[in-house]
Amino acid sequence: MTDFLESFAPGLPEQAVAATPPPARRVWRHARVATLADASGWGLIERGAIVTEDARIAWVGAEADLPALGRAAIEEHDLGGALVTPGLIDAHTHLVYGGHRAHEFEMRLQGASYEDIAKAGGGIRSTVAATRAASEDDLFRVASRRLKTLRDGGVTTVEIKSGYGLSFEDEARCLRVARRLGQSGVTVRSTSLAAHALPPEFEGRADDYIAAVCQWLPKWHAEGLVDAVDAFCERIAFSPAQVGRVFETAQSLGLPVKLHAEQLSDSGGAELAARFKALSCDHLEFLGDAGIAAMRSAGTTAMLLPGAYHFLRETTLPPIAALRAAGVAMAVSTDHNPGTSPTLSLPLMIHLACVDFRLTPEEAVRGATVNAARALGLADRGTLAAGRRADFALWELEHPRELAYWFGHPTCRRTVVGAAADMPIPPAPGTALRPPRGPRAG
Ligand SMILES: [Zn+2]
């Protein structure tokens, strides 16, 4: 039996997959498996095993019931009794950007207003300037370290939005970086968020900018850079009418939409998004009953982002009880971004979703697996069952409820993407969070 540790390929993620294609069939024994395969419950198998064929799961069950597999060409892995869950899915991130905004954070804690911060060159526009100043390779290098940190916390699928370029070429560069990151083994879904904020060169001309975005989208789509289209619908960003124009363009291209909606006020964004059968509406602190009803009938997932709620010291909670009562699926993601949620720990978000938003541990874990897959329109992952992708995470835990209980320290032992064991956890968690030094780090 091969020791699990021996199967790692050292080196960068891009090389790891290319250098060691997995054998056709693998057996992963000696695990406590939480399948999440039924509509409720953890689906816990005490002494479980998983059989994988190429990048798919062929069988999951009790080790005692393992089907006869034949001896040839089977690679066996002893998981040492680890808890195994579906790989986590981070379905809302802004992973590609230059610089960071720690100084702005410090100013805010010392009582500075948004105006003070804007005068000092802060806010989204400072990230746009740093992103535009960075080379594509710089953006890739920093984002790949962020992606590795996410993956080492159990993430095997991640959604990455553009939205800090805000010009045709700068947005395209960020989307290309997202595509490159998708060669690391972790599945990357790329979302155009060109309608994130108004770039300085369009000051006072929001309608003109939206018209430009509607002309750019078909070109990015033709280059194969876009899986979905997002927008920020808020009084400080774009109106429902402007977002509607972006969504009509997306619809004409056959691209699904999602929306940053009702984060700071109820602007009717969720109802607009539901009319376009949006995959998800995200944030939702100010979501009202009409929005909930619209999301329910459209089958739109509610994306909860407790990191931004925490970081901004918000006091209005998303309407969790009403969403639950309406049967709207709830997902949980990091919303990783430099301005309002600079976290790279999805397990920490599971914890915050329980403590701050009052989700049950099972709801929060489902929010980062099954329902996150749903929010990305991916039917082949999020649970451990025959036919699903062989993406799973191994934890130094005994029960999946502990994913919501412990917080602030790593509990993920390994991630396995497409049946390929991934690299070991990096030695110094702190270093992976910081962009490289130099003039471009902003
Ligand atoms: Zn966001």
Image (cartoon, rainbow, N blue to C red):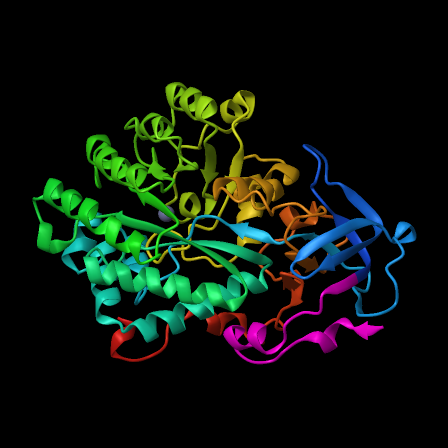
Name which residue lies at 80% across and 57% down.
31
The reply, left or right, for residue 75 in relation to residue 221 is right
Quarter the N terminus occupies: bottom right
* 260 left or right, relative to 57: left
- The quadrant holding residue 291 is top left
Look at the image and say whether residue 231 sits in the magenta stretch: no
Viewer-closest of 149 and 14: 14
In-image side of 406 versus 133 (left or right): right
Residue 251, x across and y down, in percent: 31, 37
**Is residue 43 among the parts visible in the rendering?**
yes
Out of 116 and 349, give the one closest to the viewer: 349
330 and 158: which is toward the camera: 158
Q: Is residue 101 visible?
A: no
Find the residue positioned furthest to the left. 204
Residue 70 percent across, percent down from the top left: 88, 63
| Residue at x-position 32% and y-position 64% | 100
The tally of labels here is: 0
Looking at this view, is 186 or 51 the one in front? 51
Instruction: Please tell me whether residue 89 is drawn above or below residue 290 in the rendered image.
Output: below
Image quarter (top left, top right, bottom left or bottom right) of the C terminus: bottom left
Which residue is painted at 62% across and 60% down in the image?
A: 418
Residue 93: x %, y % from top left: 42, 53
Give residue 45's position: percent from left, percent from top. 82, 46
Q: Is 123 placed left or right of 302 in the picture?
A: left
> Where 77 sits versus 114, above or below?
below
Q: Quadrant of residue 269?
A: top left
Magenta part of the chain:
1-27
